[in-house]
Amino acid sequence: MKSTVELTKTVKAKPSRNGLNYFVKTFGCQMNEHDSERIAGLFEYDGMQKASSVDEADVLFVNTCTIRENADDKLYGTLGQLKKWKGERPKRKLLVGGCAAQKDKELVRQRAPWVDVVIGTHNLTNIVNLLNQTEDWGPITEVIEEIQSLPTDAPSIRESEVSAWLTIQIGCNNSCTFCIVPSVRGPEISRRPSDIVNEAKAMVASGVKEITLLGQNVNSYGRDLKINGSSKPYFTELLTELNEVEDLKRIRFTSPHPKDFKEHTLQAVNELSKVSKQIHMPLQSGSNKILRNMQRGYTQEKYMEKLYLAKETIADVSLTTDIIVGFPGETDKDFEETLKVIREGKFDAVYMFKFSPRPGTKANYMKDDFVEKAIIDSRFMELKHLQTEISHQRYKRFIGTQQDLLIEKYSKKTDEFLSGKIDGGQTTHISSETVQIGDYIKVKITDATPFALTAVPV
Ligand code: SF4
C-alpha cells in the first residue's frame, strides 16, 4: 500500500460528532453519487446530521470528478470559494475526495491549504478515522494506489427512499484514451454475487423497490472472480439471481460496454420480468478512425451489429448512448459518421459531451489535433437538434399505452406533480393528488415531450 503522505496513524477511540452538521457536495457520475451516499452514511453513523446547505455545515465533503468539462478549474474554483467558508469558523472541516483527489493527491492541499483531509477513491471507508486524526495531527492526505477492499456493508444514506444504487464492480480494465477512470479507480474487481444479492435483499427490506447495478463496465462483471475455476462472464447469472429477490420490483444497470454485450445477456434482459428493457450502449463516436484513436475496442459496424441484436432480442427496447463531440482529429466527415449512427440507431436519449482534455489521459497529449472550440460548439448543436427530434418521436410512441411507473420524488418544478420512471427509463410526471412516493402503479401515458412523459393512473 502506498501513500503520498503519512498513512493512518494511531486512531483514538471514535469521538462521536453528535450535534454537528455535515454536507456532501458531489460532482460527476453515478459512481460518485453512490460514494457520496456512503460518505453520508458513515457521517450519520458517527452522530452527524445532514445540513440543508453548505453554509450550515460543520463538516463538508467535496466529492470531485475529473471527467466533466473543465473539471479541474471547477474544483479549484470551488475550493477557492470555500476558503471564506472555512475562515468563518476555523473548527469547520473541509474534506476532498473522489477522482481529482486520487489524481492530484497532495497538490490539492498545496493549491488549497485550508483543506483538512484529502482522501483517495480506494479508502473512503476510512473517512471518519481521518477526520478524527485531524484533531491531533492537523491536515492529512491519504491516497492509496491499490484497491484494498470493495464497497461492503458500510452504511449509506440514499437520496431516494425507493430507488438505490448497488455497486457490483469497481475499476476498469479498458484504456479509453479520453478517460481517467482506469488510473484513478484501478483495474476491475467484482464483488461476490452472494454479497450483492444479500445487499439487494437488505435494501428491499428497508423499502427500496428499484436497484441500479453500478460499475464502470458492468457487463464484464465476474470475469475476475473465476468461480469454479472459470472466468466466464457472470453478469447474466447475476441478473437471474437478483430477479428472484422477493418484493424487488425493478433492476437497472449502468454502464455496460458495447464490446462486452453477449447475446445471452440481451436474452436475459428480455426474459427476466424485473430487468428494465433499457440498454445504455455508449458509442462515443461513429467514426472508425476516432474509435480507434479512443481505443474503444469496436468499429461502427460491430457496434451496429450489437445495436440491432439488442433491438431484435428485446421487445420495444429503449436505447440510450453517449457521444463525445470534437475528439482530437475529428473532421466533418468523422462527425457525419456519428450523425449517421444517431439517425439509424433511433435512440430514446443521447448524453452528449463536448471533448475537453483531461490531465492524466492520453487524449490530453493529442494537442496537435485538438478541434477548434467554435467547431465543437456548432457540431454539438447540430447533434442536439437532431436527437431532440428523434427523442420526441421515440417518446410519442408511449402515448395511449399503459406502463408501470415507480414514483420517486416531487417534480423539480412544482409540488403539484410527482415524477418517476417507467420501465424504459423515461422520466414521467403525474399529478400528486392521486399517488404518492413509493407507489409502483399502472399508468396511462397521455403526453410526451422530447424529454419526459405525462401520465394518469389507470
Ligand atoms: S470503459 Fe473506457 S470510458 Fe468506461 S471507465 Fe473504462 S476506460 Fe473509462
Image (spheres, rainbow, N blue to C red):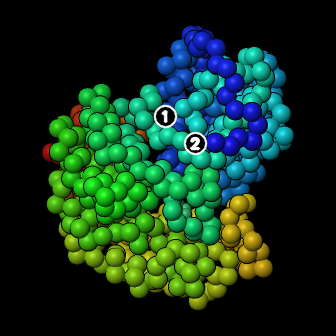
Mark 1 vs mark 2, CA separation in Å: 15 Å
Residue at horizontal 50 percent and vertical 47 percent from the top: 31
Residue placed furthest toward the bottom: 333
Please give left or right for residue 101 compared with residue 174 in the image.
right
Does residue 15 sit above or below 253 in this rendering? above
Please give left or right for residue 32 compared with residue 430 in the image.
right
Does residue 306 sit above or below 250 in this rendering? below
Q: Nearer the viewer, mark 1 or mark 2?
A: 2
Describe the element under mark 2 as helix, strand or loop. Answer: loop
Quadrant where the image shows the N terminus: top right
- Residue 122, label in figure: 2
Residue assigned mark 1: 37
Residue at horizontal 17 percent and vertical 53 percent from the top: 273
Does residue 369 sit above or below 449 in this rendering? below
From the Cβ of disc 2, is ligand 1 less than 8 Å away? no
Please give left or right for residue 208 compared with residue 332 in the image.
left
Pick the residue in front: 28 or 359.
359
| Category of crowding for the residue at label 2, using alpha-carbon neighbours closer than 10 angstroms: few (below 14), some (14–19), many (at least 20) | many
Whether residue 89 appears in this view of the structure is: yes
